[in-house]
Image (cartoon, grey):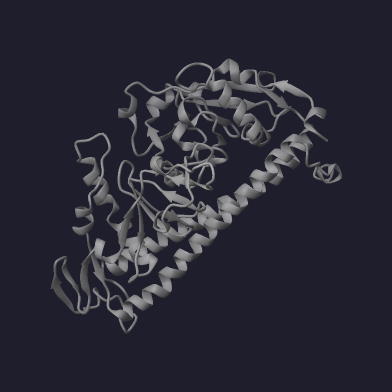
Amino acid sequence: MRLDEWSCKKLSEITIKIGSGATPKGGKKVYQQYGVPFIRSQNIYNNLFNAGGLAFIDKEKARKLMNVEIKKDDVLLNITGDSVARCTKVPLKYVGGRVNQHVAIIRPDQKYLLPDFLKYYLVTPFMQESMLSLARMGGTRAALTKGMIESFKIPVPKIREQEFISTVLSTIDDKIGINTRINQNLEAMAQAIFKHWFVDFEFPNEEGRSYKSSGGEMVESELGLVPKGWSIKSLDKVADYINGLAMKKYRPREDEKSIPVLKIKELKQGFIDSESDICSSNIDSQYRINNGDVIFSWSGSLVVDIWCGGICGLNQHLFKVRSTNYDKWFYFYWTKHHLNKFIGIAKDKATTMGHIKRKDLKDSLVTIPNLAIYKLANSIFSQLLNKQIKLREESRMLIEIRDILLPKLMSGEIRVPMEVAEQKN
């Protein structure tokens, strides 16, 4: 069964609602930490909802935006700017939220069109290219109008076929989601233990009791009282912070292979995309990034993370962090420990792009445990971090599999075993 054998309909014919959101009066001033979720374009990626930076509005402002309330199974589509054409469904916990004017709500009529099938069709390479081409026709700022969206031609196979195709793809996405949640829990656990041991000094003593609260001996240091036998170093003495290159100077020549460039955007989203720049693969090895490398963006949006998105070139404004004397978990969690302070320093800069300096690394102090505690900590934190890296690499592999299957299933190139689909009904 192929795409040309399925009937196609305009999206306007098989939906209940197509419409963009709105922003409450006051703009960014209305955003708060808690309340009704207010979803913006930066929260929406293809097949992914990014809760980082999620805004909230109070119930009264939300009440005035009832016409842009998100219902269960709504498909959200970014319609303006650099993120135009990105598409996903919102997790159930954010249903009842609102969207701003850069996001369109598409509510399928499920007698004809299943939401998951629509979402997956909109993120196929064909539809992504089509939407981007349409969006760029209107002027300098890419935008999709309501009329453009309504005119999209959508294949409409039988519901049981839509269900089978969606199930194959969503099963992969569900596993990716499980990996993400496990990693979030592992990360929260690791940071809590790290603070308990290295900041609060409540690591287990020889009797298995919390060191400081059970009367462990403390001595004066630059950081105040620390456990006897421990020492203090600056962050830049614990690890090397290698700054990236201005990659515009390292474009691949015609005879050279290329690799993607890791910039702040890619670090924040966790993956390379079709909009990512490229550079020569022949750059010095210290500027090549591999899975498992610790990356710290020190300018603009300050982020510390483990990169698991494949080989890349390190762009300026990013540090690759490594050490010959300490294990990865140690300099990773100490850098994360100081991150909020670094963010505060960057915000105080009187420039449009806040940043930190190497002096700030030097001024950031680290407690170094005695060898016995370090070995004990290493046995715990190395396992936690390695597990997170493996899960993220597994998720990247699953994403690649899904992206290979997606256009083949959505075009009918891979046939649906109808006898299996019919058994499900």
Q: How many dots with numbers? A: 0
Residue 117 appears in view: yes
* Left or right position of 321 against 201: right
Residue 306 appears in view: no
Which residue is depicted at the point 52% across and 21% down?
136
Residue 182: x %, y % from top left = 51, 57
Residue 265: x %, y % from top left = 42, 41
Q: Is residue 66 above or below residue 115?
A: above
Q: Nearer the viewer, residue 179 or 323?
A: 323
Q: Is residue 100 above or below residue 380?
A: above
* Left or right position of 406 against 291: right
**Residue sitting farthest toward the front:** 255
Residue 423: x %, y % from top left = 84, 45
Q: Is residue 51 above or below residue 79?
A: below
Q: Nearer the viewer, residue 395 or 32?
A: 395
* Left or right position of 282 against 364: right
Asked which quadrant contains residue 14, the reply is top right
Q: Nearer the viewer, residue 251 or 155?
A: 251
Which residue is depicted at the point 26% across and 34% down?
352
**Residue sitting farthest toward the right:** 419
Residue 154: x %, y % from top left = 70, 26
Q: Is residue 157 above or below residue 151?
A: below
Q: Nearer the viewer, residue 60 or 7?
A: 7
Image quadrant occupied by the N terminus: top right
Which residue is depicted at the point 14% across and 70% down?
221
